């Protein structure tokens, strides 16, 4: 089984060297590591070549292009097997690719997704989150229905990480991606300024089922130079400098700009909503059920901005009203605004309190990475691999029909799930 890990990068050699180190450390033989350099002017190429690993391929766009174009450029160099994208401040856990191969070999699905470790680099824009390491672990793999997973996406605030999102927490069969491309006049796969969410929605619609591992195989990082960190600053009003960086990045989007269907505002609801519309768009530009989708998106925006600073709240409310007028949804918009009054959440302290560990949800541990000497994603990957026992080999409980066991996990808690969990089990790596 062949795997390709794509790392798109641009002027981020400082984080790339650590992200690349976690992929080079993988023990899987049939692996290609494709670094797609978006015409960087720093020492990106030198960093890549310093690893001297024959599995690495370096490609360069030759000129500065927008993010989705770099994603598409990289995809054109992937010919077969399973492919996953990794940010240049993200990482893979030790043995992650080998574990993915064993899971896919058992389930025979066109995609695998997993829970990912979250890591905030020391320069993350919001001081409270710096060094934070959030580690999920539940040794369970299930088969998820694509239809039910999409339904879950549209419940509450959306989250693409429950889907095979291709970016950061998944591998997808390139044959499925090519089938999507074959239906596009220009054969282009990524058609939204938010390629990760777009890919998750488009691909999940094409599959009956996919494998999902609650045990993490990767780390999704957020740094001061990443889109994640800059966008977080923009929607939180946390840092004027980083908000400006986000605006500058957004201004470079030319090939597939944000849709004019939803008025722009600093909200996760707008980002997800715009991508939902792009993923549903037909070749003729129409969107089935467009008005109902827009009504759902306005709800996401209202739910998101009600807890933000006043300027972002007012911007979101103005966007809701302007968009609602375009679709004759004024009454519904006012009901949404009334149901989500402005209640700004308390500002975070200047920094997170020192702690060896803070309990979160079931099977989720939050640590202050600096207390364990963690300064980058490669350090975090080694630490998590040791903590979770990946180097020693672990067993994952495998459920062919995962709905009932996920229900037990959600409603009855970890202890009861462990009582009813049984064979078959999958030893990895």
Image (tube, grey):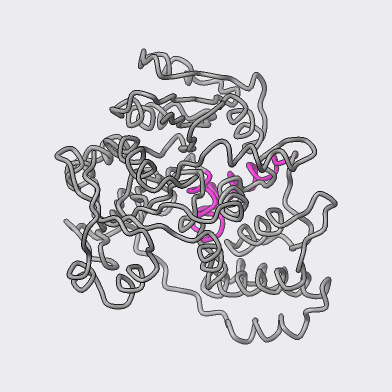
Residue 62: x and y in percent read 65, 18
- The answer to whether 76 is drawn above or below residue 418 in the figure is above
> Dividing the image into 4 quarters, which one contains the C terminus?
top left
Residue 388: x and y in percent read 20, 48
In this view of the protein, which residue sits in the foreground, 142 or 217? 142
In this view of the protein, which residue sits in the foreground, 388 or 205? 205
Residue 20 location, quadrant: top left
> Dividing the image into 4 quarters, which one contains the N terminus?
top left
Q: Is 55 left or right of 76, judged from the image as shown?
A: left
Residue 121 location, quadrant: top left
Q: Residue at the spot x=60%, y=40% of the render? A: 177
- The answer to whether 180 is drawn above or below residue 297 in the figure is above
Q: Is residue 237 magenta?
A: yes
**Residue farthest left in this picture:** 392
Q: Is 78 left or right of 255, judged from the image as shown?
A: left
Q: Residue at the spot x=35%, y=35% of the render? A: 97
In this view of the protein, which residue sits in the foreground, 130 or 167? 167
Q: Which residues are magenta?
A: 227-254
Q: Is residue 135 magenta?
A: no
Q: Residue at the spot x=22%, y=58% of the render? A: 423
Residue 309: x and y in percent read 54, 69
Residue 332 location, quadrant: bottom right
Number of numbered discs present? 0
- The answer to whether 103 is drawn above or below residue 35 in the figure is below
Residue 8: x and y in percent read 53, 31
The secondary structure that most of the magenta stretch takes on is helix
Q: Is 308 left or right of 372, judged from the image as shown?
A: right
């Amino acid at each position: 089984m062949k795997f390709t890990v794509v790392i798109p990068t641009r002027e981020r050699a400082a984080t790339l060297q650590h992200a690349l180190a976690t992929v080079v450390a993988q023990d899987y033989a049939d692996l290609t590591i494709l670094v797609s350099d978006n015409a960087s002017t720093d020492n990106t190429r030198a960093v890549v070549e310093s690893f001297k690993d024959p599995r690495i391929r370096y490609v360069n766009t030759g000129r500065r292009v927008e993010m989705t174009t770099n994603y598409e450029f990289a995809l054109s160099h992937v010919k077969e097997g399973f492919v996953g994208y990794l940010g240049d401040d993200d990482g893979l856990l030790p043995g992650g690719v080998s574990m993915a191969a064993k899971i896919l070999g058992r389930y025979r699905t066109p995609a695998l997704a997993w829970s990912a470790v979250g890591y905030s680099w020391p320069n993350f824009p919001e001081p409270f989150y710096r060094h934070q390491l959030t580690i999920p672990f539940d040794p369970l793999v299930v088969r998820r229905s694509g239809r039910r997973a999409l339904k879950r996406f549209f419940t509450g605030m959306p989250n693409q990480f429950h889907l095979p999102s291709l970016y950061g927490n998944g591998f997808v069969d390139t044959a499925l991606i090519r089938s999507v491309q074959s239906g596009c006049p220009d054969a282009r796969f990524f058609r939204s300024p938010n390629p990760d969410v777009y890919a998750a929605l488009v691909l999940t619609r094409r599959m009956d089922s996919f494998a999902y591992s609650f045990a993490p195989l990767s780390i999704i990082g957020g740094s001061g130079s990443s889109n994640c960190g800059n966008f977080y600053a923009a929607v939180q009003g946390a840092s004027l400098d980083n908000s400006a960086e986000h605006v500058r990045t957004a201004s470079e989007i030319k090939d597939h700009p944000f849709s004019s269907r939803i008025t722009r505002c600093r909200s996760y609801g707008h980002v997800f909503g715009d991508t939902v519309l792009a993923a549903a768009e037909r070749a003729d530009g129409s969107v089935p059920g467009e008005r109902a989708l827009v009504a759902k998106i306005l709800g996401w925006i209202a739910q998101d901005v009600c807890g933000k600073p006043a300027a972002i709240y007012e911007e979101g409310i103005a966007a809701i009203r302007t968009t609602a007028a375009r679709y004759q949804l004024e009454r519904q918009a006012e009901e949404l605004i009334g149901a989500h009054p402005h209640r700004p959440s308390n500002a975070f302290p200047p920094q997170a309190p020192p702690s060896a560990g803070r309990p979160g949800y079931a099977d989720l541990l939050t640590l202050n990475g600096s207390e364990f000497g963690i300064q980058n994603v490669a350090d975090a990957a080694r630490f998590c691999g040791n903590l979770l026992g990946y180097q020693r080999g672990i067993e994952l409980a495998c459920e062919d029909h995962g709905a009932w066991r996920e229900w037990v996990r959600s409603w009855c808690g970890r202890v009861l799930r462990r009582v009813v969990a049984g064979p078959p089990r999958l030893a990895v790596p």
